[in-house]
């Protein structure tokens, strides 16, 4: 059972679908932060708190109400 799965309305599918949050590859983000001398860090933090929701049906990111 996946606790990350929730329901929301997908504008692309035009119906209520299950969605999940896009998982972040923190190792990759850490490498980007090092390569940009720390400039990537705010973006990394933003992505961590505002992960896009991905529709399980069409695979597109969408905004739930
Ligand atoms: Zn969809």
Image: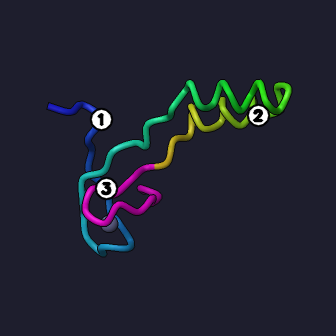
Q: Position of residue 4 (x, y in %)?
A: 30, 35
Residue that badge 2 annotates: 40
Residue drawn at the location 43% of the way across and 43% of the way down? 22
Residue drawn at the location 27% of the way across and 44% of the way down? 6
Q: Which of marks 2 and 1 precedes in the sequence?
A: 1
Q: Which SS class for mark 2?
A: loop
Boundaries of the magenta span: 53-65
Residue drawn at the location 55% of the way across and 26% of the way down? 26
Residue that badge 3 annotates: 8
Q: Rounded to the nearest whole Å, what is the CA distance between mark 2 and mark 3?
A: 30 Å
The reply, left or right, for residue 16 in relation to residue 25 is left
Q: Position of residue 36 (x, y in %)?
A: 82, 33
Residue drawn at the location 26% of the way across and 41% of the way down? 5
Nearer the observer: mark 1 or 3; the answer is 1
Q: Which quadrant of the render holds ligand 1?
A: bottom left
> Which quadrant, please, contains the C terminus?
bottom left
Residue that badge 1 annotates: 4
Nearer the observer: mark 1 or 2; the answer is 2
Q: Rounded to the nearest whole Å, what is the CA distance between mark 1 and mark 2?
A: 26 Å
Q: Rounded to the nearest whole Å, what is the CA distance between mark 1 and mark 3?
A: 13 Å
Badge 1: how crowded within 10 Å, few (<14), some, or many (20+)? few
Q: Position of residue 9 (x, y in %)?
A: 32, 62
Q: Position of residue 60 (x, y in %)?
A: 41, 63
Q: Which of marks 3 and 2 precedes in the sequence?
A: 3
Q: Is residue 25 above or below residue 11?
A: above
State how many labels appear: 3
The reply, left or right, for residue 29 in relation to residue 52 is right
């Amino acid at each position: 059972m996946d606790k990350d799965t929730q329901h929301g309305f997908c504008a692309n599918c035009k119906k209520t679908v299950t969605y999940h949050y896009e998982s972040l590859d923190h190792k990759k983000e850490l490498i980007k932060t090092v390569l940009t001398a720390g400039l990537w860090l705010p973006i990394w933090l933003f992505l961590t708190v505002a992960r896009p929701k991905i529709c399980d049906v069409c695979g597109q990111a969408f905004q739930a109400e």
